[in-house]
């Protein structure tokens, strides 16, 4: 009985995830302006633990990965990219973030090495 219950629970979660993904995609398709993460997260029903920013980001990644819809973000929120320029700006933003993270790692290593010499 426990196996059937877990299987049913898993199927319900998959269906819920699918419905949430549809709600986010619909909101993005119907918006002319970027939608902030906090607003996208509010689209998801509050009745379970999935109304978190990390879960909303997971839904967005799933839409991009599986439905092949180019959702990107800027300082104002998420939107569906419609031009190559929007894609290029997003790529540059990601590249800048990676560069910044790499720099922070280098500084952290230098700082840590300095503490070992003392």
Image (tube, grey):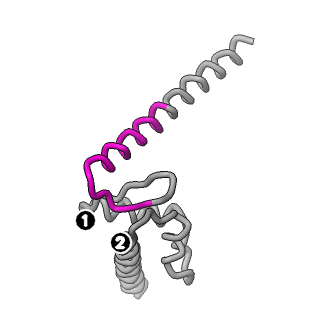
Question: Which residue in the structure is indicated by mark 2?
Answer: 25
Label 2 Cα crowd, 10 Å radius (few <14 / some 14-19 / many 20+): some
Q: Can residue 85 be found in the magenta stretch?
A: yes
Mark 1 or 2: the one toward you:
2
**Point 46% across, 31% down: residue:** 99
**Viewer-proximal residue, 6 or 94?**
94
Q: Which residue is mark 1?
A: 67
**What whole-number distance in Å separates the C-alpha atoms at marks 1 and 2?**
10 Å
Instruction: Tell me residue 38's x, y (percent).
Output: 56, 66
**Residue 3 seen in the figure:** no
Q: Nearer the viewer, residue 80 or 112?
A: 80
**Can the viewer see residue 42 in this picture?**
yes
Under circle 2, the secondary element is helix
| x then y, percent, for residue 94 | 41, 42
User: What stretch of residues is rendered in magenta?
Assistant: 78-99
Residue 3: mark: none
- Residue 114 at x, y percent in the picture: 68, 15
Give the quarter of the image for residue 81: bottom left
Residue 55: x, y in percent? 48, 65
The answer to whether mark 1 and mark 2 are in CB contact below 8 A is yes
């Amino acid at each position: 009985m426990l196996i059937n219950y877990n299987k049913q629970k898993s199927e319900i979660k998959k269906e819920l995830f699918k419905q949430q993904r549809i709600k986010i995609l619909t909101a993005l398709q119907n918006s002319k302006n970027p939608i902030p993460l906090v607003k996208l997260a509010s689209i998801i029903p509050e009745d379970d633990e999935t109304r978190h920013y990390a879960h909303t980001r997971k839904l967005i990644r799933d839409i991009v990965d599986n439905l092949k819809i180019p959702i990107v973000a800027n300082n104002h929120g998420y939107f569906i990219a419609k031009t190559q320029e929007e894609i290029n700006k997003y790529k540059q933003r990601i590249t800048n973030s990676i560069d910044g993270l790499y720099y922070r790692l280098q500084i952290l290593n230098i700082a840590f090495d300095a503490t070992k010499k003392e």
